[in-house]
Amino acid sequence: MTIFTYKSTLKITPGKVKRNEKSDIYSLGVLLWELTSGTSPFNNLTSVAVILKIINNEKEKVIPGTPTDYSELYKSCWSSDPDKRPTLEKI
């Protein structure tokens, strides 16, 4: 497992992006996916490969049998646009 799987593209690309609620929401989305998969995202890849997937906005696939409302929730948390991520209150 690598901590990079919990970071959004904005957090691992160069620039001055401050951690805020929206970056925490991204991490929560990753955790919600883990609950259905039983594993960490991209757990068979190196840290460099994981970083490349995140930079390219690649996500793990929805696990078969996951309720649609639940998968839509965590996918909205993964949005590459922080302004499109739900608030904690909405979650």
Image (spheres, helix red, strand yellow):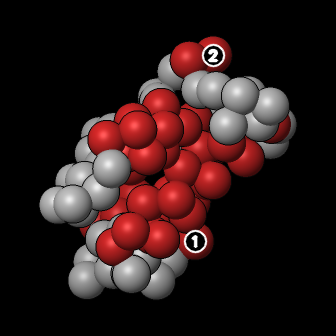
Q: Name the one closer to the observer, 13 or 7.
A: 7
Quarter of the view holding residue 23? top right
Q: Which percent across, then down, holds residue 34?
A: 45, 69
Is residue 82 shown above or below 75? above
Please tell me whether residue 24 is drawn above or below residue 44 in the rendered image: above
Helix, strand, or loop for circle 2? helix
* Percent coordinates x, y for residue 31 in the rendering: 55, 63
Q: Amino acid at mark 1?
A: Ile
Apparent side of residue 8 relative to residue 23 in the rendered image (left or right): left
Quadrant housing the C terminus: top right
Q: CA distance from mark 2 to mark 1?
A: 23 Å
- 47 to the left or right of 19: left
User: What is the x, y in percent for residue 6?
Assistant: 57, 60
Q: Residue at x 38, y 81 (%)?
A: 39
Q: Compared to 85, does 39 lie above or below?
A: below
Type of the residue with mark 2: Asp
Residue at image point 34% right, 73% down: 37
Disc 1 is placed on an element classified as: helix
Q: Which of the two residues, 74 or 82, is positioned nearer the viewer here?
A: 74
Q: Nearer the viewer, residue 68 or 32?
A: 68
**Residue at (63%, 16%) from the top-left corner?**
83
Nearer the observer: mark 2 or 1; the answer is 2
Q: Residues within 10 Å of mark 2 (few under 14, many from 20)?
A: few
Q: Taking the image as drawn, is residue 53 in sight? A: no
| Residue marked by disc 2 | 83
Q: In the rendered image, which quarter is residue 48 located in?
A: bottom left
Name the residue carrying label 1.
Answer: 3
The answer to whether any part of residue 73 appears in the image is yes
